[in-house]
Amino acid sequence: MTATAPGRPTSVESGGIEAIPTAKRHGSPWQLFATWTAPNLEFATVFVGFLAVGVFGLGFWQGLAAVVLGNALGAATQGVLSTWGPREGLAQLVLSRTAFGSRGNILPAAINTVMAGLGWFAVNSVSGAFALATLTGMPPWLALIIVVVLEVALAFVGHDLVQVFERYASIVLGAIFLIATVAIFLHADVNTAVKGGGFSFAGFALTVAAAFGYAAGWNPYASDYSRYLPRSTSSAKIAWAAGLGNFVSCTVLMAAGAASALILAPKDATPTDAFVHSMPVWVADLTLVAIAVGAIAANALNVYSGAMSFLAAGIKIPFSLRRAIIALGFGVVGFVIALVSILNSSIATNYENFLLVIAYWIAPWLGIVLVDRVLRRGTSISAFIPDKAKYRNPAGIISLIIAGVLSVLLFSNQSFYLGLVVQATGGFASPIGDLTPLVGFVLAGVLYFLLFQAFKPELGGPLTDEPEVIVGVDAADDAA
C-alpha cells in the first residue's frame, strides 16, 4: 500500500498543470462524492428543474423523468473521466491532448476556459448575489462583491482548500436543501395540469439537453480533482463516488425546481424570491444562505479549473503561483460579466441558452475523448502529454469542428439561431426540440474513429504497472 502525503489546505498551491508526483498524492476516492455534491447544491441547479415545467411546459413527472435521464448521462461520464486522473496525475484538459494533439487541444481548452472561468462563474455569482441581497437587503452589486471575493479566495489557495471546503459545504448545504425541498413539496401539487398541455417530445428533449448540459458541465474538470489520489486507488470507487455525487445532488434539486414552478409566485419576483416565497420564514432564510454558499462552492471549482484549462491551452506564465494568479484574473473579469448580468432582465432565456450551448460543445468533445481512450486502451500515453509541438493528431480537432458545426447548423433550437432541420419542422415549436448534443456526440465519436484509422497517430508503448513519469507538461514547472 503506497503511503500518501497529507493535504495542505492552508498553503497556496504552487505550479500549474504539471503531473502530481507520487510523493504528493493523497486523499480518499469518496471525497469526490462531496466534491461533486456541494457545487450542485445551489440555485442554478434548481432553475434547470424550473425550466422543465415553467418554460418547456412539461408536467412535473415528465420533467422529473427528463432531468433524471439528462443527469444520469452527465453523471456517468463524470464518473468515467474522474478515473483518468490518478494514472497520470493530470488535469482533464491536459489529458485531452492525446485526442487533439498539442496544438489542436488549444481549441477545447480555450472553450472550457471561457465557459468555466467566465460563463459559469457569472451564472453562479449572480444567483448567489441575488440570494444574499434578498436575505440582507443590501444592494445586489455589494452582495456580488462579497460572493466573488470568497469564491476567488478559495480558488487562489488551491486544490486542498477547495476539497476541504466542498466536504463541509456538502454536509451543511445538503441538510438545508433537504429541508427546503420538503417545504417546496408540501406546497406544490405535483399532479397540477400545466400551461401548454404537458408532455411534448420537444419539451422533453430540451429538458434532457439542459440537464445533461448542467451535469456534464463538470466533465471537463473531472480529473482536476482526482489527480492527487494515489495511482493505486480503485477506479470503481472513484467512478461511483464522482458519479453519484453529481447525479443525486442534481436530481434532488432539479425535482425541487420543477415542483416550485407549480407554486404561484409574486409578480416581478426575482428567481430566488419565487423559489423561497412559499416557505416558512426560517426555512426561506436558511435556503437563501445555502444558495449563496452553494454559489461559492460551485465557483471555487469553476475558477480553479478555468485556470487549469487556460494553462492547458499552452499559455506560458513564468511564475511559481501562475495558477493562483490566473484564478485572480478570472475573478476580476467574471465579476464584470456577472455585474452586467444582474442588470439584465432576461435571466431565464439567457440561462436556458447558456446550458444548451455548454452541451453543444461538451457532447462532441466527450464523444472524441471517450473513443480515443478506447482506441488507446492498454497503451502508455505519457509521450503525448507534454507541450511538444511535434505531436499531431488532426483527427480530434477535425471531428470536433465538423460535428460541432453540423449539429448546430441542423438541429439548434435557440433564440439566437434555429437549425435548418428545426426551421423545416416548425421553428421554435418544432416537435424534435433540440437534438444538437445527441447528434454532436454520436457524429464526433464516429468521425474520430474513422479519422483515427486514416491519420494513424502514435498509439504509445505498452502500459506497465509502474507509475508513468510525465515531464515537460508545463514549461514553467517548479523545481520542487
Image: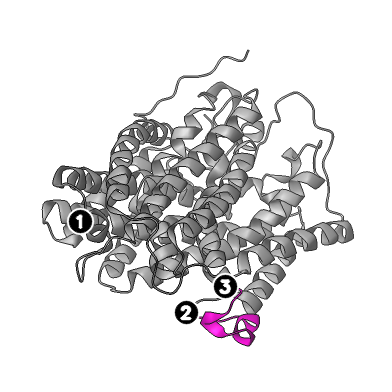
Residue 167: image x %, image y %? 39, 31
Residue 358: image x %, image y %? 52, 62
User: Is residue 234 visible to the viewer in this orientation of the structure?
Assistant: yes
Numbered disc 2: secondary structure: loop
Q: Residues within 10 Å of mark 3 (few under 14, many from 20)?
A: many
Q: Decide if residue 425 is on the left or right side of residue 476.
A: right
Alpha-carbon span between mark 2 and mark 3: 13 Å
Q: Earlier in the sequence, mark 3 or mark 1?
A: 1
State whether residue 231 is above or below residue 418: above
- On residue 277, the disc is 1
Corner quadrant of residue 39: top left
Q: Residues within 10 Å of mark 1 (few under 14, many from 20)?
A: some
Q: Give the amino acid at mark 2.
A: Ser
In the rendered image, which residue does mark 2 sit on? 415
Numbered disc 3: secondary structure: loop
Q: Decide if residue 144 is on the left or right side of residue 75.
A: left
